[in-house]
Amino acid sequence: FSIMTNGTSHRKADAAAKRGILLLERTSSLLQLDPPDLRRALAECQAAVEQDPYNPEVMRIYGCFLSNVGQRKASQQQFEAALTIDPRSDVVILSYSELLVAGVEDATSEHDEVSGSAALQRRKDQLLRYTHTHP
């Protein structure tokens, strides 16, 4: 019985990953246009999350898109929602970490190194707290 459950779990994970790949293919083709069609790519991401609200990979892709267009707060919300669904997702944790570190790098370009170190420590603590409260 546990093997069947495990197999079912793997099939669900594979299906979720495939939906993520399809989203990446659609948005990538829109972003490769000259000029890139950001509005349609955003609409694709939003529709994918609405159609598949429990797919952390789709949420991660949307979060990455939002981060790349400068919507850090909305991106953070997507990563946190994805981690709520799958708190052990290495790819979501990595993407979220990149967002947090990018925020620190932006802050340190305008401030001294000491405040940059403090900001980095705060981001690290934030991510650790989040992953520990959602094990």
Image (tube, rainbow, N blue to C red):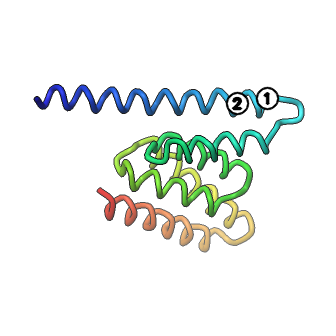
Measuring 58% from the left and 27% from the top, which residue is drawn there?
22
81 in relation to 53, above or below: below
Measuring 42% from the left and 28% from the top, which residue is drawn there?
15
Measuring 79% from the left and 29% from the top, which residue is drawn there?
32
Measuring 24% from the left and 26% from the top, which residue is drawn there?
7
Work out which residue is located at the far front of the displayed protein and give it: 51
In the picture of the structure, the residue carrying the numbered disc 2 is 28
68 in relation to 33, above or below: below
**What is the tally of numbered marks visible in this picture?**
2
* Number of residues whose C-alpha sits closer than 10 Å to that of mark 2, classed few (under 14), some (14–19) or many (20 or more): some
Report helix, strand or loop for mark 2.
helix
Q: Circles 1 and 2: CB distance less than 8 Å?
A: yes
Tell me where residue 112 sits by quadrant: bottom right
Residue 24 image position (x, y, % from top left) = 62, 31
Residue 48 image position (x, y, % from top left) = 58, 41
Work out which residue is located at the far right of the displayed protein and give it: 35
Q: Quadrant of the C terminus?
A: bottom left
In the picture of the structure, the residue carrying the numbered disc 1 is 32
Work out which residue is located at the far left of the displayed protein and give it: 1
Report helix, strand or loop for mark 1.
loop
* Number of residues whose C-alpha sits closer than 10 Å to that of mark 1, classed few (under 14), some (14–19) or many (20 or more): few
**Distance from label 1 to label 2 (Cα)?**
6 Å
Name the kind of residue labelled 1 in the image.
Gln
Q: Is residue 126 left or right of residue 120?
A: left
Q: Is residue 30 left or right of residue 23?
A: right
Q: Is residue 87 left or right of residue 65?
A: left
Q: Quadrant of the N terminus?
A: top left
Residue 108 image position (x, y, % from top left) = 67, 65
Name the kind of residue labelled 2 in the image.
Ser
Nearer-the-camera pick, 49 or 36: 49
Residue 75 image position (x, y, % from top left) = 60, 56
